[in-house]
Image: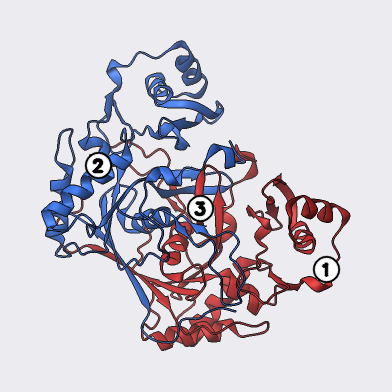
Chain colours: A blue, B red
Amino acid sequence: MTSAAPFGPPAELRVLGLGGIPEVRPGDDLARLVGDAIAGSGAGLLAGDVVVVTHKVVSKAEGRLVDLRGVTPSPFARGFAERTGKDARQVEVVLRESRRIVRMEPERGVIIAETAHGLICANAGVDASNVEPETVCLLPIDPDASAAGLRAALGERFGFTAEETPGVVVTDSFGRPWRSGIVNVAIGVAGLAPLADYRGRQDAAGYKLHVSVLAVADELAAAAELVANKLDARPVVLVRGYVPPTASPPGTGRDLILDPTRDLFR
Amino acid sequence: MTSAAPFGPPAELRVLGLGGIPEVRPGDDLARLVGDAIAGSGAGLLAGDVVVVTHKVVSKAEGRLVDLRGVTPSPFARGFAERTGKDARQVEVVLRESRRIVRMEPERGVIIAETAHGLICANAGVDASNVEPETVCLLPIDPDASAAGLRAALGERFGFTAEETPGVVVTDSFGRPWRSGIVNVAIGVAGLAPLADYRGRQDAAGYKLHVSVLAVADELAAAAELVANKLDARPVVLVRGYVPPTASPPGTGRDLILDPTRDLFR
């Protein structure tokens, strides 16, 4: 019942991890740096490309860094830190970035929190890797706005119409219940459909597809991570040749956050 | 603090969705069909490639299909089906494939179950799309064994040593708590490290990475889905150019199932 594609050249997607992004500092023009990396790679930017950027460089450019030396932990943060061997100031920042604690596990020092964005992730996205000592990095305030801003600037630089400008995905790596390890996901999206909605479409047997909304922006983020490298050597990735499988409209990262009323695992 | 890659040609990963896989039937030699598709694509098979296969064709070849006309639903299955408008025989099959119900939501007819493999997913992986009417498709009995068998056969056909034979990933699409849509994940793995373990490695600032085990097999599965297409037109995908980021040893899909004692969301 499969509507099989015939023999012949494969459908090809290329995932291009770009070099040439220097250490990003608050106030840097990230769009210029990303544009330079695209230009310097020789790959150029084509209509239909998707530009995938790890949030770390977005957050740094936007100044979303906290100097722990200026943070006074609350008694609650100190208590949790003492029981877990964590830095109380860092716990304090995690709590400030949280609008709800989903799980708190003192034995392993785990805090799973819901951020102001509605994202649910470890430490509310607060991260001390790949930043200066005594500093932590927060998520962008509005990753969708970050993605949209970067997209607009790239469109202008490379001479695209607003519609034809490649989509932009801003990513972070999240853990998942039930599964080991973390995977890259999309926290900000601009200019592409984050979900491919197959509902109502039929397979070759005429059977209506059941579970049929694919989180393609998360899959693009995951694909990009395979060349980006967790150590952030290549924080900007071009995905080339992606053909949206459905005519679903463009959306944002918020579309990837499950409506709480439909979530069985709050 | 980023150890940035220099300007220059990008690191490139190619994701090649193969055509030429016919409708698969119980007893078919899947390795031969996959080998034919690889040969027919002109892409060949190279050391370092990863062959990503949707479980649907694996399950079909292995005869993991159930004719609903031979299924007698239990009173419990009938009760749930009546309240949800579902096919009681299909609910019965879901229950038979489950070793534990994680959530059961009659209003929307949702069953999230843990399978015999330890996978937690909707309907215990039982799926009625892309199969004959009155038939449902189950997950392979042992997706790791399926992956290993396919890998061995491909290695033989294409003349690889056991060590150099490309890795194989068998996939399914799962929903996630908190996030919309489903994503492709690895349920069977052979010949590659499903997790890239960065623990103990330091970033350029000398800061030990915190959350530092990446589920790369799930990211490979996700990347493959972007060209595979939910309608299963291209159930076999070659990922070419993937460079494992750590020296983590080869493993199986079981490594991607979180140890229940470490899972805060059982």
Disc 3: host chain: B
Q: Is residue A181 in sight in this rendering?
A: yes
Q: Are marks 2 and 1 on the same chain?
A: no
Q: Quadrant of residue B264?
A: top right
**Image quarter of the C terminus of chain A:** top right
Amino acid residing under circle 3: Gly
Whether A236 is drawn above or below B42: the answer is: above
Q: Are marks 3 and 2 on the same chain?
A: no
Residue at 51% from the left image edge and 52% from the top image edge: B181
Amino acid residing under circle 1: Val
Tally of numbered discs? 3
Q: Nearer the viewer, residue A250 or B141?
A: A250
Assess disc 2: are there few (<14), some (14-19) or many (≥20) residues with their C-alpha within 10 Å of its C-alpha: many
Amino acid residing under circle 2: Val
Residue B50 image offset from top left, x and y in percent: 43, 70
Label 1: which residue?
B71
Q: Nearer the viewer, residue B112 or A162?
A: A162
- Mark 2 residue element: helix
Label 3: which residue?
B181
Q: Are marks 1 and 3 on the same chain?
A: yes
Residue A213 image offset from top left, x and y in percent: 51, 57
Q: Quadrant of residue A86?
A: top left
* C-alpha separation, residue under disc 2 versus residue under disc 1: 55 Å
Residue at 58% from the left image edge and 42% from the top image edge: A262
Task: Specify whether A56 is left or right of B222.
Answer: left
Query: Which label sits on residue A57?
Result: 2
